Image (cartoon, grey):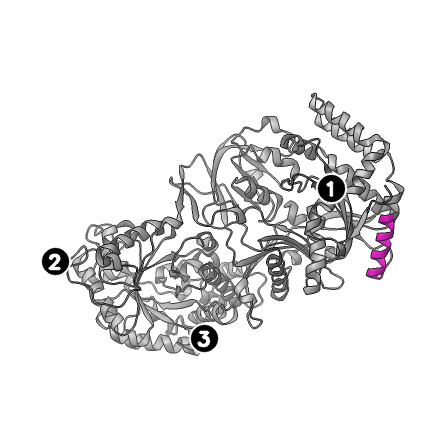
Amino acid sequence: MGHVRRVIPFTQLGRGDLGRVGGKNASLGELTAQLAPAGVTVPPGFATTADAYRELLGRYELRIRIEEQLDRFRDGAPLEDVGAGIRSLIMADPLPEELRNEVTAAYEALGRELGRPDPEVAVRSSATAEDLPEASFAGQQETYLNVCGTERLLEAVHRCFASLYTDRAIDYRERMGFGRVGVALSVGVQAMVRSDLAGAGVIFTLDPETGFPEVVVISAAWGLGETVVSGQTDPDEYTVFKPSLKDPALNPVIDVRIGAKRRKAVYAPGGLTDTVDTTAEERDRRVLTDAEARQLAAWAVAVEEHYGCPMDLEWAKDGMTGELAVVQARPETVQSRRRATTLRRCRLTGMPGEPLAEGIAVGEAIGAGPVCRLDTPVDLDRFPAGGVLVTSITDPDWEPIMKRAAAIVTDHGGRTSHAAIVSRELGVPAVVGTGNATEALCDGVPVTVSCTEGNRGRVYAGLVPHEETETDLAALPATRTRVMLNLADPSAAFRWWRLPADGVGLARLEFIVAHQLKVHPMALLHPERLDAADRCAVDQLTEGYLDRTAYFTDRLAYGVARIAASRWPDPVIVRTSDFKTNEYARLLGGRPFEPVEANPMIGWRGASRYYSEGYREGFALECRALRRVRDEMGLTNVIIMIPFCRTLLEADKVLDVMAAEGLRRGENGLKVYVMAEIPANVLLAQDFGERFDGFSIGSNDLTQLTLGVDRDSEALADVFDENDPAVTDLIRILVPRAQAVGRPVGLCGQRPSDDPAFAAFLVGVGIDSVSVAPDSFPAVKQHVAAGEERRYGEGRLVPARHRPAQADEGPSARQ
C-alpha cells in the first residue's frame, strides 16, 4: 500500500475531505486554506488519513480480531470488557513504520514553520463514517493536549486510534445500527496555543438558547478551553451585535457577563494538563477586552459567511504572544434547524414558591419529575425514565442517562458546557451552573425545572402546573396598525425575536434597575450619605469597578442594548425611570435620598425628578447609558420616552437637561416621546407635540387621574375602568390632535390583550400602534385585524393615514 497518503497538511484539506479526515480535520483544513488568507488566525497542523487507519487495521489481522470482540458484545459480553479488549488489541502492536515516518516528518516540518523543535501540539480524534455523513461522533474519542516530542506524539496518535473503541463509542454505533460499516479515524495534530497562560472558550454565531441570528455569543475562561466545554467552570459571556461590527467607529459589544471562573486547565509536568483553582483576581477580571471580543466576533462572522450557515467555533488566546486564534469550527445544529415561523411557548400556570436552586437556563422549556442525584454515570439502571438528573457536571459518558431525563440540573457549567450543548440537542430543559443543586435538591423528591423565565433557570418544589403551546406565526394577519411589544427583562428579549412585531412600544428602565442593578443611582454618587451596612453592600455589589457609577451605566446600557438589538432596526421606545419615591427608597442605599410622601402615586416621580437637585445627577447616569447605547454601540433605533410630564415648562427643563448630557432631539436621529398619562397631556397635545416626537398613552395613569381613583386601591377596584367614557373620550381627543401636528400616538398596556372590544376601539379612533406583552401578541394581532376589517374593509392593509376618529366607534360610544 505504498501509494497510500497517510498524512496531509491542513493547508491541503477542505470541507470536501470529510471522508478522508473526518469532519473536525476537514473543517480545520477549510479554515486554514480559505479563511487564514482573509485574516482569520488558525494554528497550523496536519492530519492522518482514514486510509492510514484502515492500513493499520489490515496489519496483524486487527480487523478480524476486532469483529470477533464485537460479536462477543452482541452475544451478551459486558461492554466494558469488550471495549478494554479491543483497545488493548490496537495498542499491543506498534504503528506501521510508514505512518510513523510520515507523522515524524510532518511534525518536524511543523517545528520548522513555528521556529522551534519539538513544538507543543494538540492531538485530536476526528472520526468518519463514509456512508453516513449525518453520524455524530462528538466527544466519543480522545483528545490529548500539550503533547511535546516525537515519541509522545506517536503514542498520542496511537491512543486516539484506540479511542475509536471507547465504551461509549461502541455503544453509540451499535445503537445506531452501523457497527460493521466503514467507520475510520483521522488524527489532527495542531500547534498548541499557550492559552494555559491566557484564556480560551467557545463562540456561537447566533444566540444558542433562542436562535436569535443578529449576535455572536462568546464564552471565555482562563486557561485551556476544556474547562468551558466540559462545564467545569462558569465562563464569562460576551454578546456582540453583528450589524454594529460593520462600522469600525462603533463598539458592538452589547453585553458582558462576568462568570465565576473558579477553575482553569493548565499545563502540567510531563506533557499533561491539570485543573487548578483560579485566583480571586482572575475570578473578578474579564478574560477578554471589548477589542478582543470584537476581533473574535468578526472572525466568527467571516467563518459563518464562508460556510453559509450558523457556526459553533472554539478559540484560544496565547498568553506569550497575546494573539487570538480559532482552533475549531463546525456548523451549529440545534437552533439553525428550528422553524423560524413557529413560536413554541411553555409557561407555568400554577404559582411556584421560592426556587430551591437557580442557574443558567438552557432550552426554553419546562420539565418535571423526581430528583435523581448521581455522582457518576454508571447508575443507569437506577435512573427512572422521566426523572430530573442532578449532578455536578456531565461529559459524554452521561448521555445515555441524559436521554431518559425530563430535565437536567448541574452544579457547574455555562451555556457552552457539555450539559448545555447536549440538552439543547435532546430538547431537554436544563439549569446549569447552580453552584449548589446537589446539596439543595433531595433525592426522590418531585421538582419542576423552569427555563421559561429569561436567562435564569429555576428549580421549584413539587409538580407545578404548566402548559405548552405552539403558534404558527406565518398565519397571523397583517395589520396597518403597528402591533409592538412591551419588554422589561433584557435577559428574555431575544426569545421573542421570531414574533413579527413592529418594534418595542415600551421598555422600562426601572425594571432593569430594580432587577439587575439593584442599587439607587444616588447611592453610587454619594456613598458618604449611606450607613455602614449599605456602604458595605454597595462595595460588594460593585466589586471590580473603581468608578461605582460605571457599574450603573455599564449594566443599564447592556440591558437596554439587548432589548434594542432584539428588534433592530425597528423602533424601541425606552422609558426613563418611573419609580415612585417609596419604590426608589427600597433600592439598596435609597432611603437617604427619598422623601416620605403621603401619596407617592402623584408625588415626586417621572419628569419632575430629572431636573431637580435631588435626582438630576442620577438622571445624568441614565442619559449616559442611553447615549452609549445609541452613539457608541450604534443602536440608533432607541427612542427615549419621558414619563409623567405634567407641564410644558417641565418638558422644556427635561429636554434641556438631556441636551446637556449629549441627548439632543434630532442629533444622530434621536427622537424623544412623552407619555400621555395626565389629562394635561391630552388637553395641550399640540403644545406637547411641538416639544416631543410622539405620544404613548399610559392607560392606567390616565384612568387614575381622570376618574380620581388610586389605581392600587382595592376598595375602589370596581370604579377603576379604562372603558369609562371620560377616559375613552380623552383618547378620542388626543389621537387626532397629535396626528394633526404629525405626531404618532400609541398605547402601551394590558387592556387590548384582555379586551378585544378595547382593541377595536383603539383601531376605530385611528391609533398608530398598540404595545402588548409578548405572550399576548398573537391574540392582539387578531383583535386588531378584526377591528381594521370593521373600519376599513378591503382597504385595511393600505398604509395608515392620520384621520379623525368617527364619533360612533368604540366601546364607550354614546347612544
**Residue span colored magenta:** 102-116
Q: Is residue 691 visible?
A: yes
Reading the image, the residue beneath label 1 is 142
Q: CA distance from mark 2 to mark 1?
A: 78 Å
Q: Which residue is mark 3?
A: 668
Secondary structure, magenta segment, majority class? helix
Q: Quadrant of the N terminus?
A: top right
Residue 103 belongs to the span the image colors magenta: yes
- Which labelled disc corresponds to residue 814? 2
- The picture places residue 627, in percent across and down from the top left corner, at 47, 71
Closer to the camera, 198 or 596? Answer: 198
| Label 3: few (<14), some (14–19) or many (≥20) C-alpha neighbours in 10 Å | few
Residue 713 image point, x, y percent: 25, 53
The answer to if 774 sits in the magenta stretch is no
Question: Looking at the picture, how far across and down is residue 347, in whole percent?
Answer: 41, 43
Amino acid type, label 3? Asn
Residue at the location (41% across, 73% down)? 670
Residue contact at pointers 2 and 3, CB within 8 angstroms: no
Binning the other alpha carbons within 10 Å of mark 1 as few (below 14), some (14 to 19) or many (20 upward) gives: some
Question: What is the total number of numbered labels drawn onto the structure image?
Answer: 3
